[in-house]
Amino acid sequence: MVNLMRIGLYPGTFDPLTLGHIDIIRRASRLVDTLIIGVAINNAKSPMFGLEERVQMINEEINPIANELEIQISTHPFENLLIDCAKDVNANVIIRGLRAVSDFEYEFQMVGMNRVLSDKIETVFLMADNSYQSIASKLVKEIARLGGETEEFVPRSVQKRLLSFSNTKRNRINS
Ligand code: ADP
């Protein structure tokens, strides 16, 4: 019998989760029965937030979305190859978000190489709403580090953590 359950894997570093990511999670939720957010440990990128905190921030935001859209959404930390993570969670489809032309070249190469490693798992690209397309975790972190407002870019739970991060840093500089 053919298994018609669609399992999507949306991988990323999510350092931290932004409104752009959330928009993609909502859009992906309409395409699959189960959505797994793959959280890359990615120590090489020296993340601002540890794995546990990144996962926690995502969990806080996905529960209401899962209830509202009546699908299953969960988090899955991973350190191995993306394609192996997709196999581990039985994903049929990998979801990626596309912002500007700058994302395209890297994503294009990744799909090509992943296809060599396994041609059974398709990658689907989604675009966020216009108002979220320019949001990038990297810039959010820069803004927070310099004491700027991040509320337009991240959910409230993330904003609070970013604030406490920049306050701790400021206190350290002033002491
Ligand atoms: P990575 O380390 O894989 O780049 P990110 O956490 O930065 O992970 O992003 C995860 C995924 O979400 C990527 O596919 C990225 O292109 C996508 N993404 C991030 N921000 C946005 C946004 N504002 N709009 C659309 N897609 C986005």
Image (cartoon, helix red, strand yellow):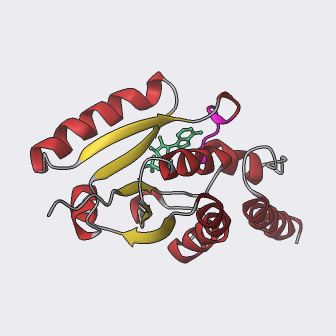
Q: Considering only vertical position in the picture, is 98 above or below 156?
A: above
Residue at image location 64% in from the left, 68% down from the top: 57
Query: Which of these two is toward me, 48 or 96?
Result: 96
Question: Horizontal and vertical percent for residue 11?
Answer: 41, 55
Residue 106 % position (x, y) = 34, 34
The stretch drawn in magenta includes residue 74: no
Judge left or right: residue 138 versus residue 1.
right
Q: Nearer the viewer, residue 50 or 104?
A: 104
Which residue lies at the image location 30% right of the left edge and 50% below the top edge?
A: 93
Front residue of this view, candidates 142 and 29: 29
The residue at 75%/67% (across/down) is 161
Secondary structure mostly taken by the magenta-highlighted segment of the chain: loop
As drawn, the residue found furthest toward the bottom would be: 52
Could you say which is closer to the camera, residue 1 or residue 116? 1
Q: Measured from the top left, where is residue 90 in percent x and y?
A: 25, 65
Quarter holding the C terminus?
Answer: bottom right
All told, the count of numbered labels is 0
Residue 148 x, y percent position in the rendering: 83, 46
- What's the residue at 71%, 31% (across, down)? 131
- Tell me: residue 147, above or below residue 170: above
Q: Quadrant of residue 155?
A: bottom right
Looking at this rendering, what residue extends furthest in the front direction? 1
Residue 134 shown in magenta: yes
Q: Residue furthest top?
A: 101
Answer left or right for 123 relative to 142: left
Among all residues in the image, which is located at the extreme right? 174
> Quadrant of the image for the N terminus?
bottom left
Q: Which residues are magenta?
A: 132-137
